[in-house]
Amino acid sequence: MTAIPAVLVLEDGRSFTGESFGAIGQCVGEAVFTTGMTGYQETLTDPSYHRQIVVQTAPHIGNTGMNDEDGESARIWVSGYVVRDPSPRPSSWRSRRSLAEDLLAQDVVGIQGVDTRALTRHLRERGAMRVGIFSGDHATAAHSELLDTVRAAPTMRGAALAEEVSTPEPYVVPAMGDKRFTVAALDLGIKSMTPHQLARRGIEVHVLPATATLDDVLRRAPDGVFFSNGPGDPATALPQIELLRAILARSVPFFGICFGNQLLGHALGFGTYKLGYGHRGINQPVLDRHTGTVEITAHNHGFAVDAPLDGPVSTPYGRAEVSHVCLNDDVVEGLRLLDRPAFSVQYHPEAAAGPHDADYLFDRFVELMEGGH
């Protein structure tokens, strides 16, 4: 088969040439890189990557193909995909299709043969930025024209995206075994493994749209409330922040992951800020400041909570403290209220592709609903 040329253009003008991988066409989004050497199917189907073009730092991608079990949602969410050396054929008994076939079938534009090490170093030095992938006839346009297309794309700051990826209708994930609790889970871009992890602990999970109101939540008579991960700028999620404040005021046990952690930060009166190039991968070291345990964790976030590391501090809902920090850069990775049953983490304890050091956080949520604090 004749290779189809493709080019990747960053908003600062740097470009990389390669060959088409997946659909032929063009795409734009925020350029981000992930350091995971496995779990690419979970990455592609994570709604938190909506409107982002993902660069895989691991050079060889696609080895195990794509299956029907490991997706974190029903579709691929990335805007575009960048790899160095895709596997020409999958090698796994669980594979149903090749990675390239799924990208093509879902009209995801990608590029292969790129020096992803150089591209990643560039993003680390310059920060996350807008990027475009252009293949086939689109790649033949003048560089200045392609650059204009990239620079016309919206930025991630100020982007309200959670409602674009949320479920349109509520649904229920039944408890496994004996039902112990009911949890109302706000879908801001929820990954399928999260309600599964809750259900394994005897929790009936009512997954609600991002537009759910306090009445929608209370109608489920929940023993606890969960806010999921999701894409976009957390400062734009004003209705969800107000909903969370109402939940905290009622002292309903609360657990938040990723976007949910950022919204808890806003609800408590802290701000959020854009990280230079974010944390994305499955090998990030995080310190649990309460136990002193270091966890290797899965991350996907470009924003972080701006909260003081020295605490506790006073909030409208009692004292709060930073419970977890990233050992690479001291970024806030978790919050905990000391006077109400609420906590959150910035990383992903459901971690379908691993690691599983943070599984205990789901048990901690169960303890809150049992009356522990």
Image: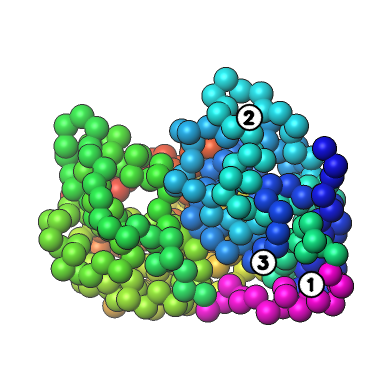
Tell which tag, 3 or 2, sits nearer the viewer: 3
**Mark 1 or 2: the one toward you:** 1
Residue pictured at 67% horizontal, 51% vertical: 23
- Residue 252 painted magenta: no
Name the residue at 23% across, 39% down: 174
Per the model, the C-alpha gap separating discs 1 and 2 is: 34 Å
Q: Secondary structure at mark 2?
A: loop
Residue 124: x percent and y percent?
75, 62
Real-space Cα separation, disc 1 to disc 3, in angstroms = 10 Å
Residue at screen point 54% across, 43% down:
42
Going by the image, does 185 lie left or right of 157? left
Q: Amino acid at mark 1?
A: Leu
Query: Which amino acid type is marked by label 2?
Result: Thr
Magenta stretch, residue numbers: 141-158
Where residue 64 is drawn, which disc sits there? 2
Q: Is residue 68 visible?
A: yes
Mark 3 and mark 2 lie on one chain; the one further toward the N terminus is 3
| Color style of the picture | rainbow
Classify 179 as above or below 244: above
Q: Earlier in the sequence, mark 1 or mark 3?
A: 3
Q: Are marks 1 and 2 in contact (CB under 8 Å)?
A: no
Question: Which numbered disc covers residue 28?
Answer: 3
Cα distance in 3D space between marks 3 and 2? 27 Å
Q: Residues within 10 Å of mark 2 (few under 14, many from 20)?
A: many
Q: Position of residue 171 (x, y in %)?
A: 25, 50
Q: Residues within 10 Å of mark 1 (few under 14, many from 20)?
A: many
Residue 355, image x, y percentages: 54, 37
- Quadrant assignment, res 276: bottom right
Circle on res. 146: 1
Tell me if residue 261 can be seen: no
Q: Between 342 and 27, which is closer to the camera in this rendering?
A: 27
Residue 65 placement, left or right of 287: right
